[in-house]
Amino acid sequence: MLKYLIFIFLHYFLTGVIYVKSLIFVYESMAEWEAAPISFLLSKLGKLDTFGFEIKSVTGYCGLKLIPEFTTGQIDVNEYDVLVIPGGIPANYAGREELFEIIRKFDCQGKFIGAICAGPVALHWAGVLKGRKFTTSVEKGSVEGFDFENYVDEYSVVDGNIITGKGEGFTEFAVSFGDALKIFTEETKKQFIELFRHP
């Protein structure tokens, strides 16, 4: 009951605070639960769109069927404020330059880019992690060329417009976005964490 009341309160508190148009990458094997808190947050701040390589059903890590609304070729970066890359299996977007180009365009415009769990691999392949602090759930040495020199062992790490998170830090990852967008009061931040907290 308490979490339901918190949900209702946050829904009305966050709606209309600021307007943010966001984009979430949907792909085969994406970790649905990692995208839940950040999706809730961003959906209350404005329009939340999904995109993938094709407009067809993909299967998430938990087995949920997901259908992107747009393809990579239909995305106009100028229309969006935030890009989120959920965790999943990086092999499913390896070599997909059309995704990496979208990431680079967001970065060039200084717009917020979030990547959680294995999602930072996409940022690495796009070339936007160089010289930036980050965190990830990917094991060191498991992705060729993935430099861990600036790795930070925290649930969530913010470096400029880049926000990264570990898979188990899905709540902290979303909170980092809320802090970056300056939408929380101390009380609403506590309530958001209560709604999505993990053991």
Image (tube, grey):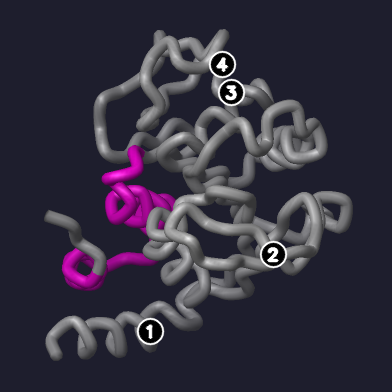
Chain part drawn in magenta:
166-195
Is residue 181 something that shows in the picture? no
- Distance from Cα at disc 3 to Cα at disc 1: 34 Å
Q: Pointer 3 and pointer 1: residues touching (CB < 8 Å)?
A: no
The amino acid marked with disc number 3 is His
**Disc on res. 130:** 4
Nearer to us of marks 2 and 3 is: 2
Which SS class for mark 3? helix
Q: Earlier in the sequence, mark 2 or mark 3?
A: 2
**Residue for badge 3:** 124
Q: CA distance from mark 4 to mark 3?
A: 8 Å
61 in relation to 156, above or below = below
Q: Counting residues from the N terminus, which is met first, the one under dot 4 or under dot 3?
A: 3
Q: Kindly report which numbered mark, 3 or 1, lies closer to the viewer in this rendering.
A: 3
Rendered location of residue 43, percent (x, y): 52, 73
Reply above or below: 10 against 104.
Answer: below
Q: Which quarter of the figure has residue 93?
A: top right
Tag 1 residue: 11
Element at badge 4? loop
Asked if marks 4 and 1 touch (Cβ < 8 Å), the reply is no
Answer whether residue 58 is magenta in the image: no
Estimate the spatial distance between the alpha carbons at disc 2 and disc 4, rounded to whole Å. 33 Å
Q: Secondary structure at mark 1?
A: helix
What is the magenta segment's predominant secondary structure? helix
Q: Which mark is residue 57?
A: 2
Q: On residue 110, which mark appears?
A: none
Secondary structure at numbered mark 2: loop
Assign the N terminus to one quadrant of the image.
bottom left
